[in-house]
Image: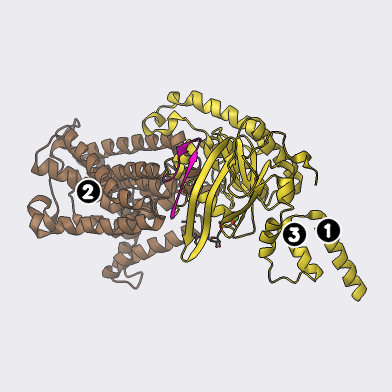
Amino acid sequence: MDFSFVPLAFGQLLSPLTIGYALAALGLAVHFGFTGLLNFGQAGFMAVGGYAFAITTTEFGWPLWASILATVLGSVLFALLLGIPTLRLRADYLSIVTIAAAEIVRYTVKTPAISSFTGGSDGINGSSITFDKLDPLPDITYGFGVLRFTNDDLWIAIVGWIVVILAAFLVRQLMRSPWGRIVKGIREDEDAVRSLGKNVTWYKMQSLILGGVLGGLATVIVIIPTSLQPDNYGTQTTFFLYTIVLLGGATTVFGPIIGSIIFWFVLSITDGLLTLLVANHLIPLTSIQQGPIRFILVGIALMLLVIFRPQGIFGNKREAHFSV
Amino acid sequence: MSDATIPATQLQVGEPGPGVPKVDPILIADGVRRSFGGMTAVDVAHVEIPRGKITALIGPNGAGKTTFFNLLTGFDRPDSGTWSLDGESLSHVPAYRVARKGMVRTFQLTKALSLLSVMENMRLGATGQGGERFGAALFTPLWRKREADITAQAEELLARFKLDAKKDDYAASLSGGQRKLLEMARALMSKPRLVMLDEPMAGVNPALTQSLLGHVLDLKNDGTTVLFVEHDMHMVQTIADWVIVMAEGKIVAEGYPSVVMQDQAVIDAYLGAHHDTDLGSLTGQLEVAKDLGDSFLVEELTDEIGEENTDAK
Ligand SMILES: Nc1ncnc2c1ncn2[C@@H]1O[C@H](COP(=O)(O)OP(=O)(O)O)[C@@H](O)[C@H]1O
Ligand SMILES: [Mg+2]
């Protein structure tokens, strides 16, 4: 039997998806965990940020810093677009608008009419040109056994993790400040916060922007070593991010990061395990059924988690909240 | 009732009555109307709140007191009407700006933030915090001093409200009455000009009510104007300088507590809620007495009902 899936699962630690999802989940934790904003369109922020980076890099030939700026501005604009009409209203309006807007983004970029820009359903390749030019690592293969990384793979993984850690410290600092106090108050009862003279709508907007920008930057980390595929930014992505956030603890800063690591590790190891079992006819499943089964397991795990440990792995039970 | 409770210098200009002008009003409201569907919840033609005094707003359930509070503080929008604080118009001003202008309210259904600690609740009430701005929040040295100041201020207030032992606990661990106290203390963090308390005594442990009355009197002594809604007639009689009576959205009476409580219109307003009750029966009278907050009468009637029941056996 082939057990190489075990080291491969550990390799997830350096996978662009793990790092990117950690950052996007941190953004979602800012929205949902800390501010109580029900953003069901984090995938939309990810798509907007990703397209801003990929188009400016590959089509316009912008330098790295300018493309990153475009990513940030794109995410900010998307947040304003969604937030201005909804944030003064009841919480459900934001959820409806975000879930719809994310899908609109995905269908729009796939429209053939603008595919010369967006690549249509094929997405965009080659977002790594500006970033890889900065790679200081010697051009050799790193790793051992089945775990092999190119110098460029390792370079984005290192920079990606540094960005995630910096973002985590930024969010932590904010949440420990008077700014964070307001945001956490809003999560619970925005009228109470309003009655104390705080401009609640503006704080919700700031939170939506912050979490959205983290989502946008997350895609940059994902697409540099891979490519930008519109269908990777569907509702399922947002659902995964919620799983990650709830897994690690929605009201914590490091929870979503650890959550992402565990999520991709478990997904990878169950995949390997199922493949092994199916290949050796140890369970009555075909390899076609194997994919869905994995996600059914994820769904069940999420249900059990919410029931038995609503605060997540790192969260504080008293701060857990599902009153939304 | 003696006139001893009526101050030597009058609060009002002319005869007390609905809408009477005040010598020194802090809040003036005109033509404030709000209807829900076909029902007019608030229809206040004119009212003035005297500065530096304690004013009680009373009336039966559903009279529109809470709705009137919501309108004045920007939490609800009127169909029409204007009002001003110290001459500055507050109509169409959003709730958070009303609070910043020094008019802070509490809620009938307590809004203590239970996932924050008692101390964090208090700090949230303070104004002028640089660290509430996104950029400044990132640099602790920019707001450390202010944080220490408001923490000291909060500790002082919490001690006054006997909540200091609880300061590091989640507000969720407080009793209903303690949450009311916390909400009031939190509102005071901003040193408001006018505090509006919606049923501050509801659910407060009787052992605490006396000190709560003391807190409200302290506020007045510090120069804060207080407007409160309360069903507890003991509180109204003990600390209010002025009483405004609402019924069915309108102001039906206004005056000094000792006088207003004897007013036929006021008694009618309260009885209005009991048109169907049989006042010939002791239980009917008991209900009305409870609403009037006449604890002596309630006790007497309860005793009488008890005696009747034992006689019947
Ligand atoms: N949001 C609302 N929608 C419909 N009716 C309301 C609303 N708020 C209050 N009312 C009605 O307005 C009237 C006044 O209510 P309220 O101001 O709460 O009275 P009070 O505080 O004096 O007991 C009541 O009849 C109540 O049912
Ligand atoms: Mg009320």
Three-letter code for the amino acid on which mark 1 is drawn: Glu
Tell me the number on the disc at residue B299. 1
Asked whether, in this view, residue A173 is left or right of residue B210, the answer is left
Residue A277, compared with residue A205, is above or below; it is below
Secondary element under disc 1, as helix, strand or loop, is helix
Whether the magenta-drawn stretch holds residue B283 is answered as: no
Name the residue beneath numbered marker 3: B290
Q: Which residue is mark 2?
A: A48
Residue B76: x %, y % from top left: 46, 52
Q: Residue at x 19, y 55 (%)?
A: A230
Q: Chain of mark 2?
A: A
Residue at 36% over, 50% down: A87
Q: Nearer the viewer, residue B213 or A105?
A: B213
Query: Magenta span covers which residues?
Result: B79-92
The image quadrant that residue B11 belongs to is: top right
Q: Quadrant of ligand 2?
A: bottom right
**Pointer 1 or 3: first along the chain:** 3
Disc nearest the viewer among 1 and 2: 1
To the question of a shared chain for discs 3 and 2, the answer is no
Q: CA distance from mark 1 to mark 3?
A: 10 Å
Compared to residue B17, the image places residue A298 above or below, namely: below
Kindly identify which chain the residue marked by label 3 belongs to.
B
Chain B representation colour: yellow
Q: Colour of chain A?
A: brown
Category of crowding for the residue at label 1, using alpha-carbon neighbours closer than 10 angstroms: few (below 14), some (14–19), many (at least 20): some
Quadrant that contains the N terminus of chain A: bottom left
Mark drawn on residue B191: none
